[in-house]
């Protein structure tokens, strides 16, 4: 399952699994955010291309308005996915500590 | 000195006497009886008052006079006195007046009160020219001295006596050896009797132990027993040769069983049995021992090992063996004050614990090369699917083939505990809808757990399954059939097949890669799924059957394929632009 909500300091916290079945919910939430946004991915266990699509769409919208989406707490497995898909060139990625 | 007696015809009476004596000597006497028989024959044939036979102890180079059973024999160095001189020269010595001969020791007479007058001393040499001893006869009856005729008779008799004595000595040596062999055999019977008569039946596990004793030495044992605490797994190997090791491992095995039956946990049993053995074993003896306890419900095997190693844990998911060292010194070597923590092995489906005595690892061929650990691991890797009885036989066959006739010098013991693998594969069908994704993930994670597949492959499998499944949902909209997913463990990894029914062909392997170099504005999410799959899995194949309108997409992910779950064989190429 997926959970997405605002955490402390306006960081958006996403946790669970961002798959094709959950992408609509994630998209609906991210459509509301504005400006420079940090997405805390430390609780994100899984992402598929559908989830990548959500992040891509959000990034495009924010950057068009001089904002951007930054990803923090990215696990090793997610980092591989971002690198294989070239998303590491689209997002500023801060690895999980 | 006295030259060899001239040959002279013996009278018929002489011959009769000698033949009678010869046949008496042929009877299978023990040594003491034979000595008495020889002395009696000599006295009779030579008409002497007294006689004695000294046996030659070649190891000590001494002559030994057996006085009577149970009394300490008299020993003189070869060369000393008349007896010694005769033994050295291997020649008959005829002394008509002992007190006139400097080699004669009158002390004997003084102690016994007997008066030795004349004496005939002759060597007993058997037909292989081996000095057996020296025969002496004293004081010819009627007051005369021993003449040439007596010397000739004595020489003929001596030859018979020598052969008879040698025969008895050798027989006794054989009997002594046989006695030791029988004692060893009895110790072996005791040792064998404590081995499990049958293998304990444990649901979900295949357990097997076997013991091949060496001919003479060795002190291995094993135990496999279902106890309240779990499955007891023991392999012990006592040092030393002969009977002692066989008995001390038997003792250890009994102590361990007793300790566990009294409710001891692994730590306590290991420590207490060690301390008890340290008190009772000879100070130069010890027993290397593996003591394990399997919790077959939690699938955890805990062990302590006193000097017994290597302990091999074949991990089915990896297709390779992990090796563990002992946790302590050999049992009985000294008291245990501090004990390192026990080792706990997770027994996943298909995993095997192998505890083998050094009789296998150190079995050497005639050139001195040892069988070694690498050969053991290789056999396990290629035969882990077999039953443990079969695997054990395969190991022993390989050892014998390796030895190529070189003898088994040490006991061989094999103890194998295998967690049965899950059925080869698992499959389920899923409704053609995004709503099935959660159920699919539940299925993959359950199939991984049940089949003992390395969990680190799960995210990759989930991603590939999701991408392929969502493609089917999105593009094969004409079909309403459920999609079947098969998931099976393979050597070192996992294989997954998605079968799509009643569909048009669409070869995912031929779909173009996403262009990930495009600037952000031009990038689209489409095509990324297959792009990712191709980079994350080892291989992907597509089959389509026109007759049944079925498509099958199969991918594999193994340890051999990629160094980690997704890390980067292709990274360099994709970052070339950086």
Image: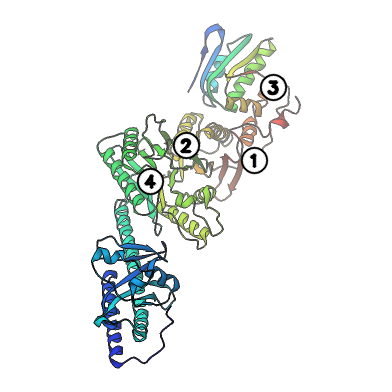
In whole angstroms, how far apart are the C-alphas of marks 1 and 2? 25 Å
Q: Nearer the viewer, residue B329 or B241?
A: B241
Q: Are marks 2 and 4 on the same chain?
A: yes
Q: CA distance from mark 4 to mark 3?
A: 60 Å
Is residue B255 rendered to the left or right of residue B361?
A: left
Numbered mark located on residue B448 in the image: 2
Q: Please tell me whether residue A48 is drawn above or below residue B309 in the rendered image.
A: above
Residue B236's disc number: 4
Along the viewing direction, whichever of B263 and B46 lies nearer the viewer: B46
Tell which tag, 4 or 1, sits nearer the viewer: 4
Toward the right, the furthest residue is: B577
Q: Quadrant of residue B149?
A: bottom left
Total tally of numbered discs in the picture? 4
Q: What residue is disc 1 on?
A: B509
- Marks 1 and 2 close (CB-CB < 8 Å): no
For the point 73% across and 25% down, the residue is B518
| Mark 4 to mark 1 CA distance (whole Å) | 56 Å
Determine if marks 1 and 3 fall on one subunit. Answer: no
Mark positioned earlier in the residue sequence (1 or 2): 2
Query: Who is closer to the viewer here, B65 or B192?
Result: B65
Mark-to-mark CA distance, 1 and 3: 26 Å
Residue A89 numbered mark, or none: 3
Residue B394 as seen in the image, left or right of residue B140: right
Pinpoint residue A71: horizontal percent, then vertical percent: 61, 17
Callout 2: SS: helix
Colouring method of the image: rainbow
Image quadrant where one finds the N terminus of chain B: bottom left
């Amino acid at each position: 399952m997926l959970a997405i909500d605002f955490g402390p300091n306006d960081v958006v916290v996403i946790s669970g699994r961002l798959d094709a079945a959950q992408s609509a919910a994630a998209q609906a939430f991210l459509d509301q955010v504005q400006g420079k946004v940090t997405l805390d991915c430390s609780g994100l266990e899984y992402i598929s291309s559908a989830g990548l699509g959500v992040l891509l769409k959000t990034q495009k919208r924010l950057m068009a308005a001089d904002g951007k989406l930054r990803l923090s707490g990215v696990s090793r497995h997610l980092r591989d996915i971002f690198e294989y898909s070239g998303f590491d060139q689209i997002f500023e990625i801060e690895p999980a500590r | 000195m006295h030259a060899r007696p001239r040959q002279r015809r013996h009278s018929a009476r002489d011959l009769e006497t000698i033949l009678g004596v010869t046949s008496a000597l042929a009877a299978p006497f023990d040594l003491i009886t034979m000595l008495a028989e020889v002395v009696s024959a000599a006295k009779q044939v030579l008409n002497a008052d007294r006689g004695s036979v000294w046996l030659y102890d070649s190891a000590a180079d001494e002559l030994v006079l057996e006085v009577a059973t149970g009394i300490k024999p008299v020993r003189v160095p070869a060369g000393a006195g008349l007896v010694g001189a005769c033994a050295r020269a291997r020649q008959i010595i005829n002394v008509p007046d002992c007190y006139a001969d400097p080699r004669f020791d009158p002390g004997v007479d003084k102690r016994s009160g007997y008066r030795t007058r004349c004496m005939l001393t002759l060597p007993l040499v058997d037909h292989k020219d081996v000095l057996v001893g020296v025969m002496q006869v004293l004081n010819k009856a009627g007051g005369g001295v021993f003449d040439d005729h007596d010397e000739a008779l004595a020489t003929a008799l001596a030859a018979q006596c020598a052969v008879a004595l040698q025969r008895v000595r050798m027989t006794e040596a054989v009997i002594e050896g046989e006695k030791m062999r029988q004692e060893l055999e009895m110790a072996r019977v005791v040792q064998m009797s404590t081995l499990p008569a049958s293998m304990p039946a444990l649901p979900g596990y295949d357990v097997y132990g076997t013991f091949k004793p060496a001919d003479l030495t060795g002190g291995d044992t094993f135990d496999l027993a279902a106890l309240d605490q779990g499955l007891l797994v023991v392999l012990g190997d006592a040092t030393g040769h002969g009977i002692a090791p066989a008995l001390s491992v038997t003792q250890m095995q009994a102590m361990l069983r007793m300790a566990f039956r009294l409710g001891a946990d692994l730590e306590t049993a290991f420590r207490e049995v060690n301390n008890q053995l340290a008190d009772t074993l000879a100070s130069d003896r010890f027993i290397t021992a593996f003591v394990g306890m399997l919790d077959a419900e939690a699938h955890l095997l805990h062990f302590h090992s006193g000097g017994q190693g290597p302990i091999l844990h074949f991990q089915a998911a990896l297709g390779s063996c992990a090796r563990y060292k002992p946790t302590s010194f050999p049992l009985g070597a000294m008291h245990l004050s501090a004990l390192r923590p026990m080792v706990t092995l997770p027994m996943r489906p298909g995993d095997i614990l192998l505890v083998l005595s050094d009789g296998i690892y150190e079995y050497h061929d005639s050139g001195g090369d040892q069988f070694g650990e690498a050969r053991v691991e290789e056999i396990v890797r290629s035969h882990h699917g077999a039953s443990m009885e079969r695997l054990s036989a395969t190991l022993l066959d390989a050892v014998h083939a390796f030895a190529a006739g070189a003898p088994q010098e040490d006991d061989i013991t094999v103890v194998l505990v295998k967690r049965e693998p899950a059925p080869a594969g698992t499959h389920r069908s899923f409704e053609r809808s995004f709503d099935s994704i959660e159920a699919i993930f539940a299925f993959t994670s359950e199939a991984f757990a049940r089949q003992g597949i390395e969990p680190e492959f799960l995210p990759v499998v989930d991603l590939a399954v999701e991408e392929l499944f969502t493609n089917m949902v999105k593009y094969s909209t004409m079909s309403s059939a459920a999609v079947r997913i098969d998931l099976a463990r393979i050597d070192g990894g996992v294989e997954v097949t998605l079968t799509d029914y009643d569909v048009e062909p669409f070869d995912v392997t031929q779909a173009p890669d996403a262009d990930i170099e495009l600037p952000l504005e031009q990038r689209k999410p489409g095509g990324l799924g297959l792009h990712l799959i191709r980079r994350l899995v080892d291989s992907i194949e597509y089959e389509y059957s026109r007759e049944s309108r079925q498509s099958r997409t199969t991918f594999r992910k193994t340890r051999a394929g990629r160094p980690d779950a997704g890390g980067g064989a292709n990274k360099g190429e994709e970052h070339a632009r950086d």
